[in-house]
Every structure is written in structure tokens, then in C-alpha cells.
């Protein structure tokens, strides 16, 4: 009791919503950047999930390997997940490196390269995931229950997409999806750790202004 402070919420000038849970005693920093861009927003089934994969495959200044190595240097764990309503990018590290981790995730969201060769490489990965998914009865049953709950008026496809839909997605499809959905008004940044609200908001504003 008394070791945490109330969660603060602030909407930045660029439209991003920020939630900060300041924990003075914590040496760990956690961040989640949620984008209102899940499979329900797919123009092509599986495109939100495909974009999530590509957010780790290089930016205008960092290669995929450099992204991984930069995370390793600060002992950070980075991950992502796509669901029906959103795509979330997460990270955790010692609080000493919160700025580097936050900048890294923001940079990937605003500056991913969508290199055609990397897209084709990742397409093969996703097709393999689809094969594994289709061979798992529990996964198929789970998705069937969820998709049927939306009713006939809302067409819902598996988050991962289908083989045909993933094969049809072009580099321009991916870029257009990001331009439409990865906007500041669609982003919620949640952080927890021994960090200051004003400092977090200043950094997020600077890093995501280009997405307005």
C-alpha cells in the first residue's frame, strides 16, 4: 500500500492517448502500444497480422538484425500480438533504458520499410503458421466460435488470414493499410514503472508526430 500512484491519462497534441502508471519502487519498465487496427479492420483477411510481422523486419535506418541487437543491448524483451480489435506492441526492460525502448518501438511503428524481399520472406513464415493453425483442431474451433458470435452482418475471418488472402497481399496493400490505420488518433500508449508522466508524454509526442 502506498507504493503506487494513480494511473494518469493524457491525450497528447498529436492525438495519441497515454496512460502512465508510475511505480516509484519498480526497477522494471513495461510498455504497450496498442493500435486500433485488428482483423476486424482488414480489407484483406490477415493484413493486420501481416503488418505486425513486418514491424520487426527493418526500418528506414535499422535492419531486422539491428532491431534485435538494439533490444539485446538493453536487455529488452519485445513482442507483438494481433487480435480482432487491435494490434499491440509490447516491451519490457530495466527502467534505466525506458527511453531507448520507447524510442525503438515508436520508430518501428512510424518508419518500417516494408522491403519487398522481406515481405516475401515473411509471407512464407505466415503461410507456415496458417498450415500449423489449420492442423490444430482447438485453434480452428476457438476461432470458429469467435467469428460466429459476430453474426451475419459482420464478416469475420481468422486473424491470421487464409492462404489465398495472404498470397494476394501486395507491398502497397501493406503500406496503404498502415497509412489508413496507424494514425495517432488510433494509438494508445500504456507504460508502467518509475517514470515521470511529463517526460513520457514529451518523448511520445516527439517520436510519433510524424504519424499525424
Image (spheres, rainbow, N blue to C red):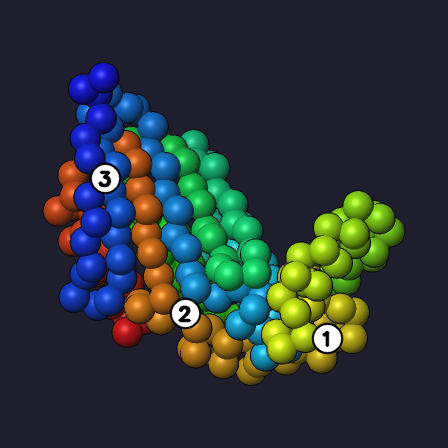
Q: CA distance from mark 2 to mark 1?
A: 21 Å
- Residue picked out by circle 3: 7
- Per the rendering, the mark at residue 165 is 1
Q: Compared with residue 32, is residue 106 higher up or lower down, i.e. above or below?
A: below
Q: CA distance from mark 3 to mark 1?
A: 41 Å
Which tag is nearer the camera, tag 2 or tag 3?
Answer: 3
Front-most of 138 and 53?
A: 138
Q: Quadrant of the N terminus?
A: top left
Which residue corresponds to the image point at 32% horizontal and 46% vertical from the top-left?
Answer: 190
- Residue picked out by circle 2: 182
Q: Compared with residue 39, is residue 190 higher up or lower down, i.e. above or below?
A: above
Which residue corresponds to the image point at 22% horizontal and 26% vertical from the top-left?
Answer: 4
Q: Please report whichever mark, 3 or 1, sits nearer to the chain's N-terminal start.
A: 3
Give the mark count: 3
Which residue corresponds to the image point at 20% horizontal and 35% vertical from the top-left?
Answer: 6
Residue 70 at what x, y percent from top left?
43, 44
- Per the image, label 1 sits on a secondary structure element best described as helix
Amino acid at each position: 500500500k502506498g507504493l503506487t500512484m494513480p494511473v494518469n491519462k493524457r491525450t497528447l497534441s498529436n492525438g495519441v492517448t497515454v496512460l502512465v502508471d508510475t511505480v516509484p519502487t519498480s526497477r522494471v519498465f513495461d510498455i504497450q502500444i496498442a493500435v486500433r487496427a485488428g482483423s476486424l479492420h482488414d480489407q484483406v483477411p490477415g493484413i493486420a497480422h501481416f503488418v505486425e510481422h513486418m514491424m520487426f523486419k527493418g526500418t528506414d535506418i535499422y535492419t531486422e538484425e539491428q532491431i534485435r541487437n538494439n533490444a539485446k543491448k538493453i536487455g529488452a524483451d519485445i513482442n507483438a500480438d494481433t487480435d480482432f480489435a487491435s494490434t499491440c506492441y509490447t516491451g519490457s526492460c530495466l527502467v534505466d533504458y525506458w527511453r531507448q525502448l520507447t524510442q525503438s518501438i515508436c520508430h518501428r511503428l512510424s518508419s518500417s520499410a516494408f522491403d519487398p524481399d522481406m515481405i516475401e520472406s515473411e509471407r512464407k513464415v505466415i503461410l507456415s503458421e496458417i498450415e500449423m493453425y489449420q492442423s490444430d483442431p482447438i485453434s480452428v474451433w476457438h476461432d470458429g466460435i469467435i467469428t460466429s458470435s459476430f453474426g451475419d452482418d459482420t464478416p469475420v475471418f481468422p486473424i491470421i488470414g487464409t492462404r489465398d488472402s495472404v498470397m494476394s497481399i501486395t507491398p502497397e496493400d501493406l503500406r496503404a493499410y498502415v497509412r489508413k490505420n496507424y494514425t495517432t488518433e488510433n494509438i494508445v500508449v500504456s507504460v508502467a514503472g518509475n517514470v515521470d508522466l511529463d517526460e513520457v508524454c514529451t518523448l511520445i509526442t516527439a517520436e510519433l508526430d510524424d504519424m499525424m
